Image (cartoon, rainbow, N blue to C red):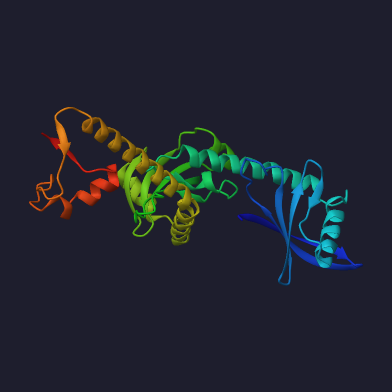
Amino acid sequence: MESNELQIELVIDSKPAMYTVSYSAFVSPGRNSKYLPVKLSREGYDAYFSLDPERERLVGDSNDERYLAVMKAFDQFLHDPENERGMPFFKNCHAAALLHGKIRKDALRAHKLGVMMPYPMIFPWEKLPEISLNGRNYKIVDAYCVQPSCACEEVALYFFDSGLKDAHITTNKIIPNLHFLYSPLNQSVSNAFDITPEEADAAAKSIPEGLNLLLRERHSRLKKEVEEDILKKVRTREKRRMGIKKAAYWRAMNSPGTRKLGRNEPCHCGSGRKYKKCCLDKDLEETGTARRVSV
C-alpha cells in the first residue's frame, strides 16, 4: 500500500522499543473506508492492524502472543493524552486518506483514453515539485500519457505561483501562469502557452537534471499505478465497439436480398483466396456467423 511512516516508542513488558508505523496514504471510498490500515515494524517483524477512528480502537487478526503485546502497547500509545501522535493525529490521517482516495477514484473514473493524466490526482499526498524560472518561483503540476502501449516520454508541465497551497492548485480550476509540453530526455519544448517559444526553450534549458530524473520516475510510477484501470477502460471501449459492429452486422444480415457467403467462394475482402482460408475465422470471432453478401 502507498503509505506514510513515522517512528514511535512502545513499552512492551516494561521495555521500551522503537517501531516504524506505516499508515495508508489513501483509503478508497467503499465498504471498508471507515478503517485506516496500519503496519508496525521492527527488526523484520511486521504487525498489521486496522484502526477505527470513529470508535477509537484497533482491530487485529491474530492471537499470536507477540502480536497481542504489540497491539496492546500501540493502543496505550494512541490513547496517551500527552502524545502528539496519538488518536487525534491518526483521526486526521484517516480524514486525509479518505480525501485522497476520493480524489484518486474521481480522477480514474473521469479519465478519457488518450488524454494526459496529472500525477497529483493519483498521488495527492505528495508535494508538488518547485522550480525557479527567470527569477520567479513556481509549483509544477505534471501530467503524462498513461496508455500501456505508448512509449512517449513527453510531460505536460503547468506552472503555478509558488505562494499557492498544493491542495488549492490540485482541487480547483486555477489557470496556470504558463504551460508547455516538455521532454525530460532531451530538454526540448513543444506547444508552449502564455510564453514565447524562445522563453520556453530558455526555461527548458534551466530545468535541473535532478528534476528531469524526478519527472521520468514519476511518469514510470504513474503509468504502473494506473495500468490496470486503463486496461479496463480499453477493454470496455473495445467491447463497446464490438457491440456496435455486431449490431450493424445483424441489421444487415436480416435485411432482404442477402445470403451467407459460402466457405469455398472467393473471400469478400478481395484477396482472391477461398473464404474459409481467408476471413471466415475472423468473421466468426467478431460476429458469430459467416459474412452476408447480396444475392
Foreground: 151 or 186? 151
The single residue placed furthest to the left in the displayed view is: 272
Instruction: Tell me, yes or no, if residue 70 can be seen here.
Output: yes
| Residue at 71% over, 71% down | 44
Quadrant in the picture for the C terminus: top left
Find residue 72 and report its horizontal and vertical position in percent: 86, 58
Find residue 12 and report its horizontal and vertical position in percent: 87, 65
| Residue at 41% over, 55% down | 206
Find residue 246 and report its horizontal and vertical position in percent: 29, 37
The answer to whether 235 appears left or right of 137 in the picture is: left
Instruction: Tell me, yes or no, if residue 85 can be seen here.
Output: no
Foreground: 125 or 239? 239
Quadrant in the picture for the N terminus: bottom right
Q: Is residue 246 above or below residue 227?
A: above
Q: Quadrant of residue 253?
A: top left
Q: How many marks?
A: 0
| Residue at 44% over, 43% down | 158
The answer to whether 138 appears left or right of 2 in the picture is: left
The answer to whether 187 appears left or right of 220 in the picture is: left
